Amino acid sequence: MNNIDIYLSVFDPVFNSTLLIAGLLFLYNYKKYPIGYYFLATFSLQMISKIFKYLDFPTNLYLFSISYYFNFLFLCFYFFKYIFNIKKTHYYLLLVIGSLPMIVKLFDWNNIKNFEAYDWIIYDTFILIFTLVAILKLVQQIKINKYHLFICFGVLAFFGLDFSVAFTMNYIVNGAYKIVSWVYLLRSIVLLFYFLTLSICTWKILKKA
C-alpha cells in the first residue's frame, strides 16, 4: 500500500463519519431544514457504493450522477432561500429540468472505457454560476453575512476543482492509478473542506435564526 492509498483509507472513514454525524445532528435539531437529509443521502450513496464494490459490480460511477443531482437540489434550495428571490413555481420547474442530465446519464449505459462526465459538467456549471452571482450579491450588501460568504467560497472551491476534473474524467477513470490517485486525494480533501464549511456555517446561520 502506497502513501496515497493510506491517505485515502484515512479520509474515507473521516469523510463518512462527518456526513453521518452532521446529518443526524441537523436532522435532530433542524428537521425542517433539508441539510440533514442532504448529508444522510450523500452518506447513503457512499455506503451503496461500497456494497457495489463488495459485490463486484462493473462500476459505481453512475451513483455519482445521483449524487450530483443531490448537490444541485440542495444548493438550489440554499441559494433561492437565502440569497436570491424567486417564485416557488420557477424554483420547482428548475429542479425538474435539472433532473434531466441525471436521468439521461442513468439510461446511457456506455462502456466504462468510453465514460464521459457530461452530466457532472452541467451540474457544476450551474452551481458555479449560482455561486458567483451569490458572492457578487453578498459583497454588495451594506452588512455582509460572513457565514453565507464562507459557504459560497467552500462551494466555489470544490465545484471549481470538480468542474476541471470532469473534463478529464475518462482519463482519470482509465488512466494510470499512480498518477490519477493524486487527483482523487486532492478532490477528497477539498470535498471534506466543502462539507465541513457547509455544516459549520449553516449551524451558525440556523442558530441565529
Image (cartoon, rainbow, N blue to C red):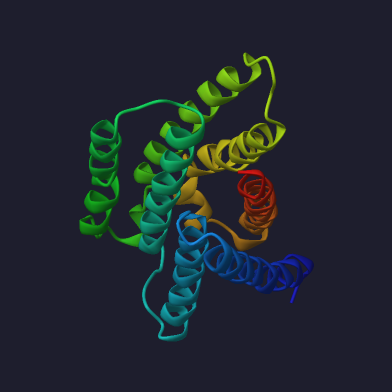
Q: Residue furthest front?
A: 209
Image quarter in which the N terminus is found: bottom right
Q: x%, y% of residue 200?
A: 69, 51
Task: Decide which of 161, 171 is in the foreground and name it.
Answer: 161
Q: Residue at x 34, y 53 (%)?
A: 114
Whether 166 is drawn above or below 173: the answer is above
Task: Decide which of 108, 204 is in the foreground and name it.
Answer: 204
**Residue 124 left/right relative to 22:** left
Q: x%, y% of residue 40?
A: 49, 67
Q: x%, y% of residue 87?
A: 30, 29
Task: Decide which of 56, 91 is in the foreground and name it.
Answer: 91
Give the quadrant of residue 164.
top right
Q: Residue at x 59, y 24 (%)?
A: 135
**Residue 162 left/right relative to 125:** right
Image quarter in which the C terminus is found: top right
Q: Residue at x 23, y 34 (%)?
A: 89
